[in-house]
Amino acid sequence: MAKGGFPGGGFGGGFGGGGNMNNLMKQAQKMQKDMEKAQQELEGKTVEVSVGGGAISIVATGKKEIKEIVIKPEVVDPDDVEMLQDLILSAVNEALRKADELANSEMGKITGGLGGLPGLF
């Protein structure tokens, strides 16, 4: 059997000692605080989307909460409710997509390209 198991005679020895681990922990804690702050700021940021030539407008927050839906009266046709439903669906999906882009952009500033980590956003 080989003695030691890890180079440097112990778990920390081959990884640069405990000082680097402390720095890594401090960086991780700072990143977590920055991410929490950015998530709070996203609640105050909005995206706006219009579809159907401005017939329907949606405002959503960076946290993907729909804040406002505006429907121009001339779009409301009792004989064509399906068109109105399609316009609303399209507008909501586009607003949520833009809110996602905003969130990813803001978080990307903090993570520096680590955005592929599951569960971050």
Image (cartoon, rainbow, N blue to C red):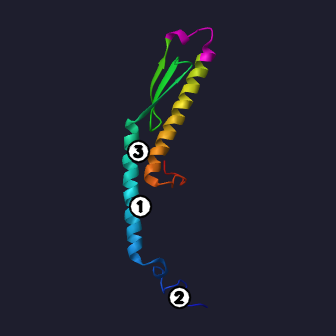
Q: Residues within 10 Å of mark 3 (few under 14, many from 20)?
A: some
Amino acid of disc 3: Gln
Question: Please, what secondary structure does the residue beneath circle 1 have?
Answer: helix
Q: Give the vertical position of 85 relative to 6 (above or below).
A: above
Mark 3 or mark 2, which has the lower sequence index?
Answer: 2
Q: Is 109 or 9 nearer to us in this picture? A: 109
Please tell me which residue is depicted at 55% across the width and 53% down the height of the picture.
116
Question: Please, what secondary structure does the residue beneath circle 3 have?
Answer: helix
Name the residue carrying label 2: 4
Please tell me which residue is depicted at 55% across the width and 85% down the height of the picture.
5
Name the residue carrying label 1: 28
Q: Give the vertical position of 100 relative to 71 (above or below).
A: below
Q: Residues within 10 Å of mark 2 (few under 14, many from 20)?
A: few
Q: Answer yes or no: do the residues labelled 3 and 1 have beta carbons within 8 Å? A: no
Q: State the quadrant of the N terminus.
A: bottom right
Amino acid of disc 2: Gly
Residue 80 within the segment the image draws in magenta: yes
Q: In this rendering, would 53 be left or right of 12?
A: right
Q: In this rendering, would 26 be left or right of 88?
A: left
Mark 3 or mark 1, which has the lower sequence index?
Answer: 1
Residue 76 within the segment the image draws in magenta: yes
Q: Which mark is residue 39?
A: 3
Residue 35 point in image, percent of width and height: 41, 50
Q: In this rendering, would 52 be left or right of 29?
A: right
Mark pair 3, 1: CA separation: 16 Å
Mark 2 or mark 1, which has the lower sequence index?
Answer: 2
Mark pair 2, 1: CA separation: 30 Å
Q: Which residues are magenta?
A: 73-83
Amino acid of disc 1: Ala
Please tell me which residue is depicted at 49% across the width and 36% down the height of the picture.
99
Q: Give the vertical position of 19 relative to 45 (above or below).
A: below
